[in-house]
Amino acid sequence: MNSSVIDNNNKKKNYGRLVKRLKHRIRSVSIVLQKTDKSKVFHLGTRQHYEKKSNEYMEKTKAYQCLGENDPLPNLIERTNKYLLDLRLAHWIT
C-alpha cells in the first residue's frame, strides 16, 4: 500500500514538472495549444497558422471588422470607472 502512495506522489510531482516544461517549450517556439470545440482533443499549431486561419475565416464570413488603431476599449474603461466612482461617491454603491 505504501508503495502505491509513494508512486502516486511521484506521478503528481512529475506531472507538475511536465506541465511547466511544456508551457516553456510552447512559449519558446510560438506554438498554440488549443482545445477543439466539440471534443476533449487538443490541437497544436503555429501562431502563424492560427493567424492565417483566423484571417481566412474573417474574410470568408465578413462578420468581423478589424479595429486597427481605433481601439475603443481604453475610453470605455475610463468612462465605466468614472461612472462607478460617481455612484460610489453618491453612496449608491459601496
Image (spheres, rainbow, N blue to C red):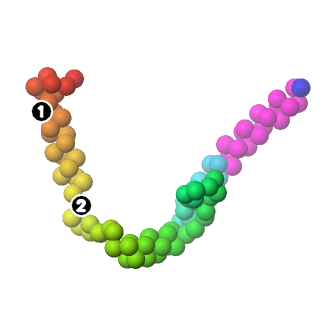
Upstream in sequence: badge 1 or badge 2:
2
Q: Which mark is residue 71?
A: 2
For this rendering, which residue is in front, 93 or 21?
93
Q: Dividing the picture into quarters, in which one does residue 59 lie?
A: bottom left
Q: Which residues are magenta?
A: 2-18
Which residue is identified by label 1? Answer: 86
On the question of residue 86 being in view, the answer is: yes
Q: Number of callouts in the render?
A: 2
In this view, 62 is above or below 39: below
Q: Residue drawn 53% across and 65% down?
A: 30
On the picture, is 68 further left or further right than 90?
A: right
Q: Residue drawn 14% across and 30% down?
A: 87
On the picture, is 54 further left or further right than 18?
A: left
As for residue 11 lying within the magenta part, the answer is yes
Secondary structure type for disc 1: helix
Categorize mark 1 by other alpha carbons within 10 Å: few (<14), some (14-19), many (20+). few
Tag 2: amino acid: Asp
On the picture, is 9 further left or further right than 33?
A: right
Residue 76 percent location from the top left of the image: 20, 50
Residue 83 percent location from the top left of the image: 14, 38
